[in-house]
Amino acid sequence: MSKSPAPLIGLTLDSEEAGGYSKFPWYALRQNYCSSVSEAGGVPLVLPHEPAAVERYIDLLDGLIVTGGAFDVDPALFGADAKHESVTTKANRTQFEWAITKGMLARNKPVLGICGGQQLLNVVLGGTLIQHIPDAVPNALAHEQPNPRDQAGHSVRIAAGSRLHAIVGRDELPVNSAHHQAVDKPAPGCIVDAVAPDGVIEGIEHPDYRFCIGVQWHPEFFISEGDRALYAAFIEAAKS
């Protein structure tokens, strides 16, 4: 029996205006977003923000990772009346990610949302966000952890009976943390599968899709075997 080919996994890019790396606008993505896909058995493909190419991308891709970055989802997209002063938006990036995420889900192709990608996924599915955790959650943890991102900042409790629990095989995971926003109201049909000790939602999943999971931490650093298991499950789903 022939071995199935490695699935092609799309990864969304962050974007920056002129300055720093280039005098012109540029894209950015940490290398371990790609190396983690390769290590798990997939082929990474980075996706420029080209709305006209969305359907072609979807035709090609076996799975999608919506990455994190230095930006926030526009609060208007989840019906908020005001925008917190800490919120920074990137309209072109969000427009592109919105379209490709909806398109992948419409074809029931696997989607993994990471950090800001989880937030985008929740909003695309009809949920809302906390715009700034320190102003909304009493006695909140340091979700913008001061220690390096390749170390744990806190732990999360994994919900028994969830798909995430079946994947990682543990009730608790150490996670890294680099966010000031989080899921507020989960989207209709979504299950909360991971929660921080301060009550902040750290993971969601939608059981109606082949693979639709969002996590607030950065599993691409592989700081636990649970992170590796999540990637393995995602890649396996993308093969089918």
Image (spheres, rainbow, N blue to C red):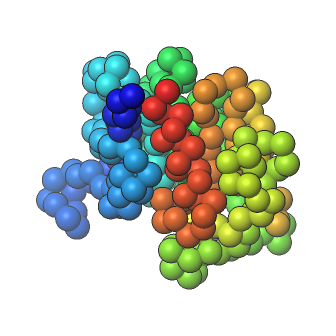
Which residue appears at 44% of the width and 51% of the height?
40
Which residue appears at 61% of the width and 27% of the height?
210
**Quick check: can you spot residue 209?**
yes
Q: Which quadrant holds residue 10? A: top left
User: In x, y percent, where is residue 18?
Assistant: 21, 56
Which residue appears at 56% of the width and 70% of the height?
223
How many marks the image carries: the answer is 0
Quadrant of the frame with the N terminus: top left
Residue lying at the far front of the rendered structure: 1
**Quick check: can you spot residue 179?**
no
Residue lying at the far bottom of the rendered structure: 147
User: In x, y percent, where is residue 69?
Assistant: 44, 55
User: In x, y percent, where is residue 51?
Assistant: 32, 26
220 left or right of 15?
A: right
Q: Is residue 156 above or below residue 68?
A: below
Residue lying at the far left of the rendered structure: 23
Which residue appears at 59% of the width and 54% of the height?
229
User: In x, y percent, where is residue 143?
Assistant: 66, 68
Q: Which quadrant holds residue 28? A: bottom left
96 left or right of 105?
A: left
Q: Is residue 161 above or below residue 79?
A: below
Is 116 in front, or is 103? 103
Is 217 in front, or is 110? 110
